[in-house]
Structure formats: structure tokens, C-alpha cells
Image (spheres, grey):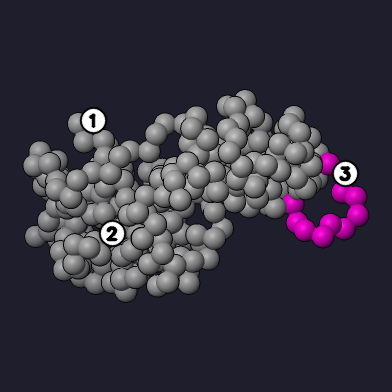
Amino acid sequence: MSATATARRELAEFLRSRRRQVDPRAAGLPAGGPRRTPGLRREEVALLSGVSHTWYTWLEQGRDIRPSRQVVDALARTLRMSPAEHEYVLRLTGHGGAAPAGAADGMPAHVQRLLDALGPSPAYAITAGWRIVGWNRAYQRLYPGVALVPAAERNLLWLVFTDPAVRDLLGDWTTDSRRFLTQFRAEVGPRLADPEVVELVARLEAASPHFRAGWASHDVDRFSSSERRFEHPQVGTLLLEHHQLTPADAPGLQLVVYTAAEGGDAADRLARLSA
């Protein structure tokens, strides 16, 4: 299936999933009698968004049509999308920024030097498909498995859902893994037809019921810097602030950096871990 056809199918499934989650009363519709299915009906979405019922039905069927930016914005309002969901639909319909192209397997030497210069702050680099291609010594102390797993399995999402060591390291694995999944989907949505993404999703669906259920929900979310909790077997609880950066001269890479959260002893614990 072509990338365009895959994006249309993803858009159709995503719109259906959001439509079923909207309370008709929240959309300004009368409660009425009981409904056979939850959420809004297609004709109600069409009416509230200012499009024809037939046209919207075609959109949910994955037909070869491209909604305008104005229509996408109207659908986002009707379906009460979050900013991350709205951005996701814009990218699927070709109105948002393009997804970054995949990076080569190698790491630019200057990017590796930047990671190394961060000292006790754990940091690593991932490609657009979330393959881990570089890390510093502090990150290897935080998660020793990164250097031990075969390169073919050194994918952040794969490790989150399949490596017991990562499950133990994350402070709240159920919540954290779900956050990783929704952010990954938001990033790769326009590239769901890429062989790398198709293979990764298929392997994860086979390996993890938790991933399978989360992927079927079509939930998406954008990244935001915030505090993360890790439980390390050597230094105990680490409260770290999570940052994500993209080098201007290596746009296919994302750098993930953890710094000590304010108001605690994380800096001391990181220093002990790096000693």
C-alpha cells in the first residue's frame, strides 16, 4: 500500500475513533433517546462541521479526497480534538510539517561529542523511526542494556515494551509506556507505510498485548518536557527532567537528555552513578 493510501486509511480510522468518544451533549446536541453506538453519528459530525454527510462518509471510508485546512480545523472543533490530535490530522492531510526523513545508521561525530559533553546527564540519540544510534556514558550507566542488545533490536519503543530491565527502570511503566506509544504514533503517522515502521508495529503487536491495545486506540500526544521518575538498582529513585532536541544540521535525529530535577537529590545520585 502506498504512503498516501496508508495516510488516508489512518485518517479514516482516527476520525472514527475520535467520533465515538464525543459526548453528543458536549457537542451541543440534545440528549435524545438511547443510541446503538457511543459518540456522534456521521451525519451529526457533517452537520456540525459544515460538510455534506456523503462527503464526510467518504472521508471515513478512506476515499481519495483531500480536505482543506478549513475543513480539518472544523472537524477538529467538532470532534473536540486536543492540540496534538489536531496537529496529527493536519499532518495526515498534508497541511502540517512533513515528518523528518529517516537518518542513516551512523551517528555524526559532532553529535556524539555533544552527547559526551553532557557529563552526568544521561542522553541518547534516536532516528525518526526511534532507533537508538548514539548515547553517552551516563545513559549507559542508567540503562546498561543499551550497549548489550543487538543493533537490530535497539529501538526505543521495542525496548520499552519488551525489555524487563526497562520495565523495572521506568517509575510507572504502564503510564510511561503509553506515553511513549502515543508520542511515537504522533511522530510517524504520515509515514505509517514505511517498511521500518510497518515491521516494528507488527513485531510489537505480536510481542505485547499492552502495545496492541494501545495502538488500536489511535491515541496520539505531543512531547512535552516534564519530570520523569526512574528506579535504578544502584542509586534508587531518580527524578529527572526530560528534554528533546533536534540538531539543526541533523534533522533526522532527536536528542533525548535527562537532567536532574530541581528541589531534590537527583544531581547527587547522578554523580554517584557516573563516578
Majority secondary structure in the magenta region: loop
Q: Of the residues under marks 3 and 2, which one precedes in the sequence?
A: 3
Q: Position of residue 133 (x, y in %)?
A: 19, 52
Q: Quadrant of residue 98?
A: top left
Q: Residues within 10 Å of mark 2 (few under 14, many from 20)?
A: many
Q: Of the residues under marks 3 and 1, which one precedes in the sequence?
A: 3
| Residue segment shown in magenta | 29-39
At horizontal 79% and vertical 41% (from top left) the residue drawn is: 44
Q: Amino acid at mark 2?
A: Asn
In the figure, 116 relative to 208: above or below? above
Quarter in which the C terminus is drawn: bottom left
At horizontal 73% and vertical 31% (from top left) the residue drawn is: 51
In the figure, 245 relative to 133: above or below? above
User: Label 1, label 2: how many angstroms apart (C-alpha)?
Assistant: 23 Å
Residue 50 visible (yes or no) = yes
- Label 1 sits on a secondary structure element that is loop
The residue to which callout 1 is attached is: 248
- Label 3 sits on a secondary structure element that is loop
Label for residue 260?
none
At horizontal 38% and vertical 67% (from top left) the residue drawn is: 203
The residue to which callout 2 is attached is: 155
Tell us which disc is closer to us: 3 or 2: 2
Label for residue 30?
3
Q: Residues within 10 Å of mark 1 (few under 14, many from 20)?
A: few
Q: Amino acid at mark 1?
A: Ala
Q: Position of residue 263 (x, y in %)?
A: 32, 49
User: Label 3, label 1: how many angstroms apart (C-alpha)?
Assistant: 51 Å
Q: Is residue 186 left or right of residue 30?
A: left
Q: Of the residues under marks 1 and 2, which one precedes in the sequence?
A: 2
Q: Amino acid at mark 3?
A: Pro
- Label 2 sits on a secondary structure element that is loop
